[in-house]
Image (cartoon, rainbow, N blue to C red):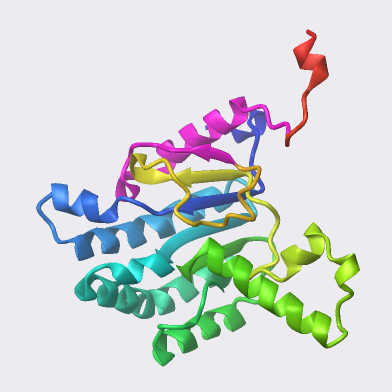
Amino acid sequence: MDYSKLKVPNHVAIIVDGNGRWATEKGMSRSEGHQQGFLNLKKLLAYMFSKNIKYISAYLFSTENFKRSKVEVNFLMNLLTGQLTEILEFCHQEKIKAVFSGRKENLSKKVVEAMEKIEQDTSKYQEKIFNICFNYGGHAEIIDATKKIVKDVQAGKLDMNKLDEETFNHYLYQDLPPVDLMIRTSGEQRLSNFMLWQNSYAEFYFPKTYFPDFDENEFDQAILEYTKRDRRFGGIDYAKKNH
């Protein structure tokens, strides 16, 4: 599809949803669904970045996901750890900078060390940014940012009277631009505590497709829909209104 005539978002966020249901409907284990979802994510990332999208944030594991069965949680942890070497190779190949958003609590030392390694090894890349949201929660991010602000105010590093939205953004897990397009696969229509600050003026798109089947053509449809949207950021386009 020719993207030259379409609106291309700067920052796309994806709630990777439906892996387990995709597998269950096929008589497979939920773990197999997560494995397939991971394989699809790499393929989709390469395609999205090729369309001049600079920032991609993917919601892979929330703080609330620890409520799932121990078997599924352990599989997801091992999947991330086991695939980080492959993720690193993929990032080098595509010249992608990978960063992680979320709390380190409840993560094993092995997982944390692997995450830190990939961040360090890809830090030289600046044109494409892949934000991996793992053990992430939007409420937790805002609380953690507030705690850091309080510490800096108490230490005299920040004048509270000069705190504005731009400054607050610097204290989030990653200092990224606002999300332009937020996609949640599987047909669910809620944010589920995902990037609440960054999604404040994002356009939402909720395809019914489970994530393992959300391919390049599906993403093209999302961009076609995004192109149709009239983004006013709380204002009114009077020229169009009075046309």
On screen, residue 20 above or below 151: above
Please give left or right for residue 25 compared with residue 10 in the image: left
- Give yes or no for residue 230 being in the magenta stretch: yes
Q: Residue at x 24, y 58 (%)?
A: 33
152 or 32: nearer the viewer: 152
Instruction: Find residue 115 and report its horizontal and vertical position in percent.
Output: 49, 81
Q: Residue at x 69, y 32 (%)?
A: 231
Instruction: Find residue 17 and report its horizontal and vertical position in percent.
Output: 35, 52
On screen, residue 35 above or below 2: below
- The quarter of the picture where the C terminus appears is top right
Instruction: Find residue 102 and report its horizontal and vertical position in percent.
Output: 52, 72
Which corner quadrant of the image does residue 156 belong to? bottom right
- Give yes or no for residue 104 being in the magenta stretch: no
Q: Residue at x 63, y 44 (%)?
A: 180
232 or 24: nearer the viewer: 232
Instruction: Find residue 241 and report its horizontal and vertical position in percent.
Output: 76, 14
Farthest top residue in view: 243
Farthest bottom residue in view: 109
Q: Residue at x 86, y 77 (%)?
A: 158
Please give left or right for residue 101 compared with residue 21 in the image: right
Say whether residue 131 is visible: no
What number of labels is visible?
A: 0
Say whether residue 147 is visible: yes
Which corner quadrant of the image does residue 108 belong to? bottom left
First to last magenta residue range: 203-232
